[in-house]
Image (cartoon, rainbow, N blue to C red):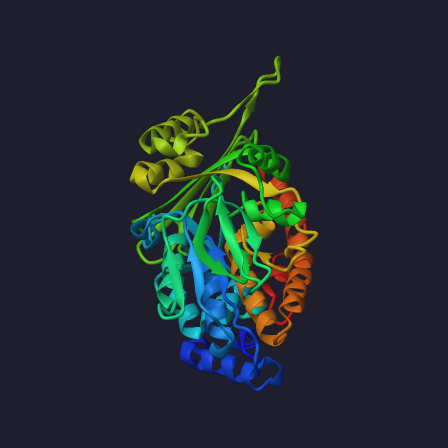
């Protein structure tokens, strides 16, 4: 059995517990060591930009997949400070379906996947669409279709799990790292020097850069533009051209309370304003935790066409004011159908609120790897998309698993490994991005979801 090809075995919770990360790692390294082409290969020394789900999962997957004689130091650069990085209440919710669970096991072993399901997440049993006549319950068929559930938990808890699995003797986390605007390749050893906006060279060097810095990634702009640097004053224009804005703001939090007793156990609740201007969502997010999320559309003046956003761009700087604005907006809707959201917002510590614009990359690809073979994109850096299918964290885990398997399987052919990774991920993510955008538009118009592609999404395995 090839390492990182364990996903087909992940069929039930009891089977998850039957294996361990140590066994997974030994299988991975034994498989690679048996390949004669893997010997005498210059060690891979990646620098990973971003310590979110995609960045930490990439570090862990490479740690477990690549034999130690082929792997040098893994360096992860993160703008946040050390305390914030380890805060497991950061961010909002994470949905992992069967594909995400398989990817998590492929990245870190069965015990890691089991840990996610043991109190850190909740199994989703269905969705309750709130209507004036009462909730309409739609059972979730994921477990029946695949043998694995749809799960939902805290983003910060998943990040902390990945962080805790990293081997400190192999992986260095550099916090408070400055923004990077470009890189240079040393012709002598092929290593990369990263440079900041003021031209300063960072001391951390490696022979591959893995960009996991999010949808506004500088490295995405470099890869797609065939460049090695960007001037700070031109970056805003390049980002604006690269990103599509949905005209909505998303406000989210995970609250340390259980779902209200009147809510059906295991069900996520959703309500949409008749005009599509507001969407409210909530559901269980692990033991003792409940998430809520709001999607609020910008308003357009019919006369002037001027667009007004519900929250200013710097709203994250005053979260108590955000909480009050949200409550005022919900109460002003004049319906009891969104009382479930009002109740949860009232119970929320403002410091737990997370705000993001509804944004997606204008495209996926055509490449996820730079032409010089020195930069590869993962997570939202590669394929930021609508969250209507809730696939962003799962796709980041998929990226990490596929990247590590390609690097392992291609031996000393790093260029070929990266090209294979790019082809596999672009094809899948383009299709998900297209359908996610269509689904989001239909949902906010109050229309039926139409074709349900979740079965296709959930049946992914790392070998595809």
List the single residue furthest toward the top: 303
Picture quadrant of residue 169: bottom left
Where does residue 171 sit, x and y in percent of width and height?
40, 65
Q: Nearer the viewer, residue 261 or 154?
A: 154
Left/right placement of residue 261 relative to residue 332 reads left
Residue 55 in percent (x, y) is at 47, 57
Q: Is residue 249 left or right of residue 20?
A: right
Q: At x 52% / y 76%, what residue is drawn?
A: 70
Residue 191 quadrant: bottom right
Q: Picture quarter containing residue 328?
A: top left
Residue 244, placed above or below residue 94: above
Is 274 situated above or below 182? Answer: above
Q: Position of residue 241 (x, y in %)?
A: 64, 35
Count the numbered circles shown.
0
Q: Relative to 216, does residue 463 appear above or below in the rendering?
A: below
In the image, 24 versus 461, the foreground residue is: 24
């Amino acid at each position: 059995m090839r390492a990182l090809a364990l996903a087909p075995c992940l069929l039930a919770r009891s089977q998850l517990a039957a294996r361990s990360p140590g066994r997974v790692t030994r299988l991975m390294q034994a498989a690679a060591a048996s390949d004669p082409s893997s010997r005498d290969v210059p060690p891979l020394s990646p620098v990973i930009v971003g310590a979110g789900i995609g960045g930490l999962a990439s570090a862990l997957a490479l740690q477990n997949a690549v034999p130690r004689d082929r792997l040098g130091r893994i360096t992860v650069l993160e703008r946040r400070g050390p305390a914030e990085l380890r805060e497991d209440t950061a961010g909002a919710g994470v949905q992992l379906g069967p594909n995400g669970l398989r990817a998590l096991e492929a990245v870190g072993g069965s015990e890691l996947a089991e840990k996610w399901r043991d109190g850190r997440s909740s199994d989703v049993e269905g969705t309750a669409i709130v209507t004036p006549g009462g909730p309409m319950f739609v059972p979730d068929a994921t477990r029946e279709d695949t043998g694995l559930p749809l799960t939902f938990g805290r983003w910060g808890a998943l990040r902390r799990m990945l962080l805790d699995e990293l081997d400190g003797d192999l992986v260095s986390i550099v916090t408070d790292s400055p923004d990077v605007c470009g890189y240079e390749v040393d012709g002598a050893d092929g290593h990369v020097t990263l440079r900041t906006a003021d031209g300063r060279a960072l001391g951390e060097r490696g022979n591959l850069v893995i960009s996991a810095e999010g949808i506004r990634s500088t490295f995405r702009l470099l890869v797609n533009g065939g460049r090695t640097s960007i001037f700070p004053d031109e970056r805003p224009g390049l980002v604006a051209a690269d990103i599509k804005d949905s005209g909505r703001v998303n406000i989210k939090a995970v609250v340390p309370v259980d779902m209200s007793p009147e809510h059906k156990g295991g069900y996520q609740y959703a309500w949409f304003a008749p005009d599509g201007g507001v969407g409210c969502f909530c559901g269980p997010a692990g033991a003792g935790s409940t998430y809520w999320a709001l999607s609020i559309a910008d308003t357009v003046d019919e006369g002037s066409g001027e667009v007004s956003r519900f929250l200013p761009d710097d709203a994250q700087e005053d979260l108590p004011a955000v909480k009050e604005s949200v409550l005022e907006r919900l109460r002003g809707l004049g319906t009891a159908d969104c009382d479930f959201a009002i109740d949860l917002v009232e119970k929320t510590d403002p410091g737990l609120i997370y705000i993001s614009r509804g944004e997606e990359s204008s495209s996926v690809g055509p490449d996820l790897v730079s032409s010089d073979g020195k930069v590869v994109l993962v997570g939202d850096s590669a394929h930021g998309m609508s969250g209507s299918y809730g696939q962003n964290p799962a796709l980041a885990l998929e990226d990490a698993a596929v990247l590590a398997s390609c690097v392992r399987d291609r031996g000393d052919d790093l260029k070929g490994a990266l090209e294979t990774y790019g082809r596999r991920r672009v094809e899948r993510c383009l299709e998900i991005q297209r359908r996610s955008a269509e689904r989001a538009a239909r949902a906010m118009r109050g229309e039926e979801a139409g074709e349900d592609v979740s079965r296709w999404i959930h049946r992914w395995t790392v070998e595809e």
